[in-house]
Image: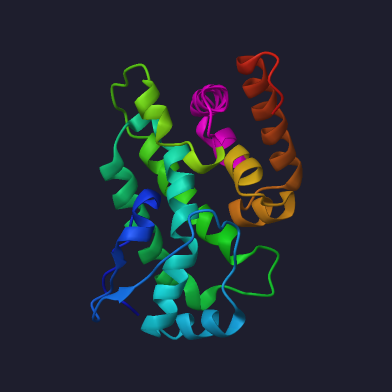
Amino acid sequence: MPARIIVTRPSQLLHSRERFDAPPVEAYVDARVSHREIDRLTLERAKRGDRAACRALVATYQRAVFSMLYRMLVARRSRAIVDELAQETFLRVFRALPGFEAEGPARLSTWILTIASRLAIDELRRPVLLEPLTDEDVDQAIDDSLHTNAEQRSIARKIARAVADLAPDFRETFVLSVYHECSHEEIAHSLRIEIGTVKSRLSRARAAVKEALGEIEV
């Protein structure tokens, strides 16, 4: 198992390296690719601590992890916190990976994102003095490749602000479902809650976001 992991922010993926304690290995990732899963052979090798397989796992899922953390923690205004929690996410992933069941109800991506979201919720429980969000703060949670004009970016900012205002548990469920396309069953299994609770949280989150956005469909 790698002793140290260095992962990069999404905007840096095409221009930087991911490293373990082994010699650096280039890891180029298409920033537009999402919801990919590593193959079974790579997963089994990563479970055994194979360094190349572990690097492949980080390269495959790090963008989704950063996306989750930015959306959960936009109000914290701290890239350093997001970076730190991304590191901790993968450390916990590798510690627990041997126990992950590929045939279980949740995909590996959902399992990893749940670890990230739990860390984010723990961070949100820490009392801090928050100031009103600026557009620059909100932009950290927006995918530039999907919002190419001013109107799209304005809508994306409104959505990001509305999501940031959700209670942590609702925000977690909303982000997993809407942004990462996790099923109700996957979310329930990963968060260890009933499917009815997932549906209730998602319904209330959608209602709150829709109310905040007015006529914009979510």
36 relative position to 68: left or right: right
Q: Is residue 154 above or below residue 139?
A: above
Q: Is residue 189 above or below residue 97?
A: above
Residue 151 or 215: which is nearer the viewer?
A: 151
Q: Residue at x 51, y 34 (%)?
A: 168
Quarter of the image with the N terminus is bottom left
Q: Is residue 31 above or below residue 140?
A: below
Residue 150 or 197: which is nearer the viewer?
A: 150
Q: Residue at x 29, y 37 (%)?
A: 78
Counting from the top left corner in percent of width and height, residue 56 is at 45, 74
Quarter of the image with the C terminus is top right
Q: Which residues are magenta?
A: 147-173
Q: What count of labels does the image hold?
A: 0
52 relative position to 44: left or right: left
Judge whether residue 88 can be spotted in this image.
no
Tell me which colouring the rendered structure shows: rainbow
Counting from the top left corner in percent of width and height, residue 33 is at 56, 58
Q: Is residue 150 magenta?
A: yes
Predominant SS of the magenta segment: helix
Residue 167 or 181: which is nearer the viewer?
A: 181
30 relative position to 124: left or right: right
Could you say which quadrant of the image residue 89 lies in?
A: bottom left
Q: Is residue 66 above or below residue 144?
A: below
In the displayed orientation, state which residue is furthest to the front.
149
Q: Residue at x 64, y 75 (%)?
A: 102
Q: Is residue 169 magenta?
A: yes
Counting from the top left corner in percent of width and height, residue 42 is at 52, 82
Judge whether residue 83 can be spotted in this image.
yes
Counting from the top left corner in percent of width and height, residue 171 is at 55, 35
